[in-house]
Image (cartoon, rainbow, N blue to C red):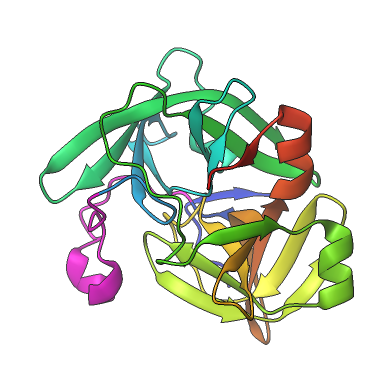
């Protein structure tokens, strides 16, 4: 049975609202909410857009990118903020919330993708592109994934790193077995490389459960980066 906060078509969307029941004690110490001192993949984001319960969306920062104009940006889940007015994105840290940017583009198309772009230009928060201290050396296409069949990992602000095998892949989405929870939406999904770097694969947006456990669903970043004119920030 699914533990639901927001659902769409039987899929649990992994965005959290501010709930008193979610305490740091429930989170593994190495990945406590708000521990990141810099804007980096896996950091804890808060949107000024409000969820259906009147609370701000809480999500995870995805891959750091460079826009066509050369400005820094960050991918996350599209459903984390689709409000053209309340588009401010804050990073939650032990010392308080810090404005890091604004949502400037998003797409939420069931069965196709759920991804958004945060413009970080003008932010005074230090920017880091590494995923869990590993450099992003490439972006994998659907063809690369089908050929190489890598194990995938995600780094969520809520539950940290978990990895597992691929269950399915299309030209725009990928699914794999791993663990996540509410608040991990937007997390970077990646494949570890033999040289110690990682390959960018997707942006987590939801999960489903079956008799064998949890399946994470992510939007592939390769087609989005091409269509939106983005490049890896390295």
Q: In the rendered view, would you say 119 is above or below 206?
A: above
Magenta stretch: residue 117 in it? no
Residue 20 in the magenta stretch? The answer is yes
Residue pushed farthest bottom?
212
Q: Is residue 128 left or right of residue 230?
A: left
Residue 211: percent from the left, percent from the top?
68, 85
Q: Residue furthest top?
A: 85
- Residue sitting at 41 percent across and 66 percent down? 132
Q: Compare residues 161 and 143 and report the one nearer the observer.
A: 143
Q: Main secondary structure of the magenta part?
A: loop
Left or right relative to 145: residue 135:
left
Give the tally of numbered discs. Answer: 0
Foreground residue among 65 and 34: 65
The stretch of residues the image draws in magenta is 15-37
- Front position in the image: 222 or 49: 222
Q: Residue furthest left?
A: 95
> Is 147 drawn above or below residue 21 in the view shown?
below
* Residue 187 in view here: yes
Residue 214: x and y in percent read: 61, 76
Q: Position of residue 50 (x, y in %)?
A: 39, 29
User: In the drawing, does residue 74 fall left or right of residue 223?
Assistant: left
Residue drawn at x 14%, y 41% as measured from the top left: 96
Q: Is residue 169 visible?
A: no
Please give left or right for residue 149 compared with residue 24 in the image.
Answer: right
Residue occupying the point 57% across, 79% down: 163
Q: Position of residue 26 (x, y in %)?
A: 25, 72
């Amino acid at each position: 049975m699914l533990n639901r906060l927001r659902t769409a078509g039987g899929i649990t969307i992994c965005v959290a609202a501010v709930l008193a029941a979610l305490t740091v004690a429930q989170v593994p110490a190495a990945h406590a909410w708000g521990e990141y001192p810099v804007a980096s993949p896996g950091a804890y984001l808060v949107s000024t857009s409000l969820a259906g319960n009147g609370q701000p969306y809480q999500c995870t920062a995805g891959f750091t990118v460079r826009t066509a104009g050369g400005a820094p940006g960050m991918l996350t889940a599209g459903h984390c903020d689709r409000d053209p007015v309340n588009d401010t994105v804050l990073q939650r840290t032990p010392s308080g919330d810090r404005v890091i940017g604004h949502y400037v583009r998003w797409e939420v198309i069931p069965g196709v993708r759920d991804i958004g772009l945060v413009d970080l230009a003008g932010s005074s928060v230090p920017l880091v592109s590494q995923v869990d201290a590993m450099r992003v050396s490439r972006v994998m296409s659907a063809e690369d994934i089908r050929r190489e069949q890598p194990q995938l990992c995600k780094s969520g602000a809520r539950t940290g790193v978990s990895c597992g095998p691929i269950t399915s892949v299309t030209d725009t989405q990928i699914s794999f077995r791993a663990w996540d929870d509410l608040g991990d939406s937007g997390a970077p999904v990646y494949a570890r490389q033999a040289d110690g770097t990682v390959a960018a694969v997707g942006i987590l947006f939801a999960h489903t459960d079956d008799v064998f456990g949890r399946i994470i669903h992510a939007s592939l970043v390769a087609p989005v980066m091409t269509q939106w004119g983005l490049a890896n920030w390295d």
